[in-house]
Every structure is written in C-alpha cells, then in structure tokens.
C-alpha cells in the first residue's frame, strides 16, 4: 500500500460499488460499474486494481461478483 490516497474517479468507483451492494445485496459486475459511470470496462478494471492495491477493496480472483469493500475513504 504505497499511496493510500484515492483519486476522485476511484472514489466514484468505490461509491458505485457501495450503492450497488446497498441496492441489490450483492456486488456489481465490472460491466455494471462501467455502465453506471459511463466509462469502459478496462478503465473500471484499472481503478479496481488501484483500489485493491491501496487496501480499499478486495475480490476473489476468477470469481464473478466477489468485490468487497474493506474500508471507506
């Protein structure tokens, strides 16, 4: 966890995850985050990787809908 400060867009991704979980009781797929924020799935993946590296989220590799929020900003 080098720099745990997150960017505005990373904060938006984190909020989208939190909102989706609150509304649906399960985590979103990357495509659902992309659709909500009007960004590409590859951009979502980049933000998710950064958030994971900074200790904000985690997920089970190779399994869908396993994103978990570990801490709030």
Image (cartoon, rainbow, N blue to C red):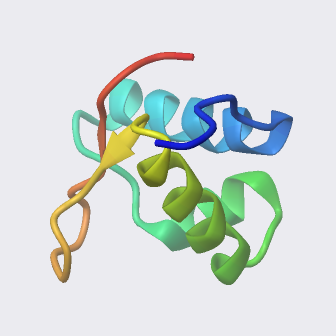
Q: Position of residue 42 (x, y in %)?
A: 66, 82
In this view, the residue farthest toward the top is 72
When the figure is inspected, residue 31 is found, relative to residue 2, above or below; the finding is below
Q: Position of residue 67 (x, y in %)?
A: 30, 51
Q: Position of residue 62 (x, y in %)?
A: 18, 83
Residue 39 is left or right of residue 2, and the answer is right
The quadrant where residue 69 appears: top left
Please report the residue visible at 83 percent of the width from the left and 34 percent of the height from the top.
8
Residue 18 is left or right of residue 27, and the answer is right
Please report the residue visible at 64 percent of the width from the left and 59 percent of the height from the top.
47
Please report the residue visible at 70 percent of the width from the left and 43 percent of the height from the top.
10
When the figure is inspected, residue 1 is found, relative to residue 52, above or below; the finding is above
The quadrant where residue 28 appears: bottom left
Between residues 41 and 51, which one lies in front from this camera angle? Answer: 51
Image quadrant holding the C terminus, namely: top right
Between residues 35 and 48, which one lies in front from this camera angle? Answer: 48
Q: Position of residue 31 (x, y in %)?
A: 55, 73
Please report the residue visible at 31 percent of the width from the left and 37 percent of the height from the top.
24
Tally of marks: 0
Residue 29 is left or right of residue 45, and the answer is left
């Amino acid at each position: 966890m080098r720099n745990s400060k997150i960017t505005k867009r990373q904060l938006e991704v984190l909020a989208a995850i939190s909102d989706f979980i609150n509304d649906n009781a399960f985590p979103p797929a990357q495509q659902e985050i992309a659709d909500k924020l009007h960004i590409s799935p590859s951009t979502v993946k980049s933000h998710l990787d950064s958030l994971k590296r900074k200790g904000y989220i985690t997920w089970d590799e190779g399994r869908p809908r396993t994103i978990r929020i570990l801490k709030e900003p």
